[in-house]
């Protein structure tokens, strides 16, 4: 295997590598298939879909500007192999639950891809600006939508509660802006920022807006992940079933009294502190203060 890797490295250095893509071998280990042609450089073109929608709203792929912006994000995400492979693995665990909540809330399923570009489905995701969790809420916005954010409890890291809160934000944004696409852009730019841009530029949709670079790319990143994850084999991502991260069987414990030491609590429940925090990243300290009339539901691995 080492000699193979050195061989590939030599080809890259010499400019002889022309095509690399992922395939699954008979023993289901991911390997690289290499085609070499002397004197040729690596090249692989992507065919964009002719028609595309986000949340039931048409993407104007007949406009050159739109094609180029979509094209950019498709290349970035289809060639960012380590990132996209890990997202595909995590999706098996988290998207069924997220999809279920989106459906309950009346939010289009495509918004699960917004969640992905926000956090890569990493439970403890946190940005330099202080946004946190799967949906990357800032503390003030989280509290506005009913999430508790204290030193001990930070429900931005509670996947179910944060997903419900994100749905409330998106529905409110859609009501004010008129379309789900604009609501998605507002998740990055803010409703006020989108409204001001529309007013100043005298346009009424996302694709006609001239925006800052981050928001200009934002919706197209969602579109790219939707396209790739809807048909990963088309973009040479083939993962065998056993390599995906599956949903874990869990149980819940309702806590109505203060827990002074969560490590001791975990031990009493047959797990360790690390496992407790893995399933409940919203617990931010080694204690949980429960005020009168309040309760918390703690998730634990299902007993065998």
Image (cartoon, grey):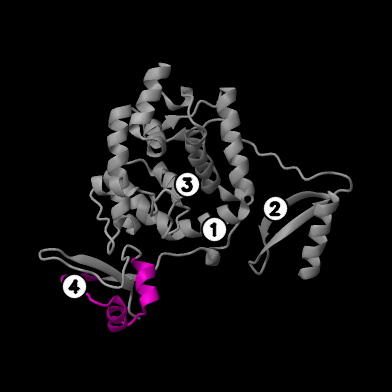
Q: What is the spatial separation of the Cα atoms under label 4 and label 3, in whole angstroms? A: 36 Å
* Residue picked out by circle 4: 258
Q: Earlier in the sequence, mark 3 or mark 1?
A: 1
User: In this rendering, does residue 106 appear at all?
Assistant: no
Residue 200 lies in the magenta-colored region: no
Q: What is the spatial separation of the Cα atoms under label 3 and label 1, in whole angstroms? A: 13 Å
- Residue neighbourhood size for the residue with mark 3, other residues' Cα within 10 Å, grouped as few (<14), some (14–19), many (≥20): some
Tell me where residue 238 appears, x and y as whole percent: 61, 56
Mark 4 and 1 residues: CB-CB less than 8 Å, in contact?
A: no
Report the quarter where the C terminus lies.
bottom left
Above or below — where is 230 with respect to 47?
below
Tag nearer the camera, 1 or 2: 1
What span is in magenta? 253-280
Tell me where residue 64 appears, x and y as whole percent: 60, 23
* Residue picked out by circle 3: 117
- Residue neighbourhood size for the residue with mark 4, other residues' Cα within 10 Å, grouped as few (<14), some (14–19), many (≥20): some
Report the quarter where the N terminus lies.
bottom right
Q: Earlier in the sequence, mark 4 or mark 1?
A: 1
User: In this rendering, does residue 83 appear at all?
Assistant: yes
In this view, the residue in front, 149 or 98, is 149
Q: Is residue 189 left or right of residue 46?
A: left
* Residue picked out by circle 1: 86
């Amino acid at each position: 295997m080492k000699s193979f890797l050195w061989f590939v490295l030599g080809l890259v250095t010499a400019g002889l590598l022309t095509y690399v893509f992922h395939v699954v071998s008979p023993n289901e280990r991911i390997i690289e298939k290499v085609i070499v042609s002397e004197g040729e450089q690596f090249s692989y073109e992507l065919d964009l879909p002719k028609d595309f929608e986000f949340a039931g709203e048409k993407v104007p792929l007949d406009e050159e500007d739109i094609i180029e912006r979509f094209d950019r994000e498709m290349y970035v995400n289809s060639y960012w192999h380590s990132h996209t492979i890990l997202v595909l693995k995590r999706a098996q665990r988290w998207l069924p639950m997220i999809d279920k909540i989106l459906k309950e809330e009346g939010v289009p399923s495509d918004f699960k891809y917004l969640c992905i570009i926000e956090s890569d489905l990493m439970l403890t995701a946190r940005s330099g600006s202080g946004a946190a969790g799967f949906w990357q809420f800032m503390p003030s916005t989280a509290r506005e939508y009913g999430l508790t954010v204290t030193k001990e409890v930070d429900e931005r890291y509670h996947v179910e509660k944060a997903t419900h809160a994100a749905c409330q934000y998106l529905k409110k944004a859609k009501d004010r802006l008129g379309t789900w696409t604009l609501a998605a852009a507002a998740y990055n730019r803010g409703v006020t920022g989108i409204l001001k841009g529309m007013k100043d530029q005298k346009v009424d949709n996302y694709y006609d807006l001239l925006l800052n670079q981050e928001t200009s790319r934002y919706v197209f990143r969602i579109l790219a992940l939707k396209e790739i994850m809807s048909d990963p084999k088309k973009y040479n991502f083939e993962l065998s079933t056993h390599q995906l991260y599956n949903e874990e069987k869990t149980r819940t414990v309702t806590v109505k009294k203060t827990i002074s030491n969560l490590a001791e609590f975990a031990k009493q429940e047959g797990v360790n502190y690390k496992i407790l925090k893995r399933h409940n990243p919203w617990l931010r300290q080694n204690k949980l203060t429960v005020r009168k009339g309040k309760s918390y539901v703690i998730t634990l691995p299902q007993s065998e």
